[in-house]
Image (cartoon, rainbow, N blue to C red):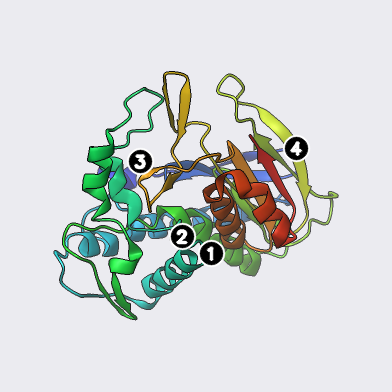
Amino acid sequence: MGARESARTISVEAGQGCLVGRFDAMASPCEILIESEDRALASQLTRTAAAEAWRIEDKFSRYLPGNVVGRINTSGGSPIEVDDETASLLDFAATLFDLSDGRFDITSGVLREVWRFDGGDRVPSPQAVNDILGRVGWHQVSWDRPILTLQSGMEIDLGGIGKEYAVDRVAGMLGEAADCSAVANFGGDLAVTRAPRERGAWRVGIEAVSAQNRGAEKVVEIRTGALATSGDARRFLLKDGVRYSHILDPRSGWPVEGAPRSVTVAADTCTQAGMLSTLAMLEGYNAEAFLDAQGLEYWCRR
């Protein structure tokens, strides 16, 4: 067993009227809340959830060489044939690119070469950003399912949709494995398997956007469906009194103007909620108008 595998552990403990399974995945604390007193069931469900989350992380993380994303990103312009699961995520990414008029773009990750959102004040020069932009743009990608061809020097990063996808996958597995209500919560992006029986609803805290306040700014109740949050509470730059959000417009290579500090959306699935919260952030000053048009419940903090 490698160091990565041996460091992966789960735990189960009592919560408030439920059992809570915990593990880490996708650079996030993950928890499974189970409306049951059956510790053996809770352990089984937590192991199932963790295994699926780790499978998705290992397959799609851009940080791990040799997986499908690594093969694509090191293809040097050669065509790569992908499996059905990867193809479906690429189809979804292509749809988001079209829906957002190019604002959501899984090839924009290379901009990290010049942008370091670590709370410091190192803002790149316009020339440095422009030098990267030639390697950004889904419209430059040849995607004819199941064959993907990137131009040499380009990369993809599925991090913008991977965690929400994992939450929905895990919630579906938990719903099939147990007849009690459960919540899959990966770093604040979550889905409920079914309405709880013993409690009125699951209570979920929405994190405050202030760096000085790490507590919940608001508590919402959820019986079914999902929540997802996009924001820049921890990833930003501050220079000469100007705050630069990590939400970049891939068309310009610069932070989106007027982006909210945080957007949380309630929807039927975590993937849908994550898509809408991300697209709202990319709308900048028009985030609220965009969300109002969707007819869903949301919380937007500026």
Badge 2: residue crowd in 10 Å (few <14, some 14–19, many ≥20): some
Residue 52 disc label: 2
Disc number lying in front (2 or 1): 1
Disc number lying in front (3 or 1): 1
Pick whichever, 47 or 204, lies toward us: 204
Name the residue located 55 percent from the left edge and 23 percent from the top edge.
211
Which structural element holds mark 1?
helix
Position of 213 relative to 138 (above/below): above
Distance of mark 2 from mark 3, alpha carbons? 16 Å
**In this figure, which residue is indicated by the disc labeled 1?**
169
Distance of mark 3 from mark 4, alpha carbons? 32 Å
Q: Cβ–Cβ below 8 Å for labels 2 and 3?
A: no
Pick whichever, 144 or 25, lies toward us: 144
Q: Quadrant of the C terminus?
A: top right
Residue 32 seen from this side: no
**In this figure, which residue is indicated by the disc labeled 4?**
219
Report x, y in % for residue 126. 28, 37
Residue 61 image-quadrant placement: bottom left
**In this figure, which residue is indicated by the disc labeled 3?**
7
Distance of mark 4 from mark 1, alpha carbons? 25 Å
Disc number lying in front (3 or 4): 4
Q: Which amino acid is tagged 1? A: Arg
Which structural element holds mark 2?
helix
Q: Give left or right: position of 204 versus 121.
A: right
Name the residue located 21 percent from the left edge and 54 percent from the top edge.
65
Residue 77 seen from this side: yes
Distance of mark 3 from mark 1, alpha carbons? 23 Å
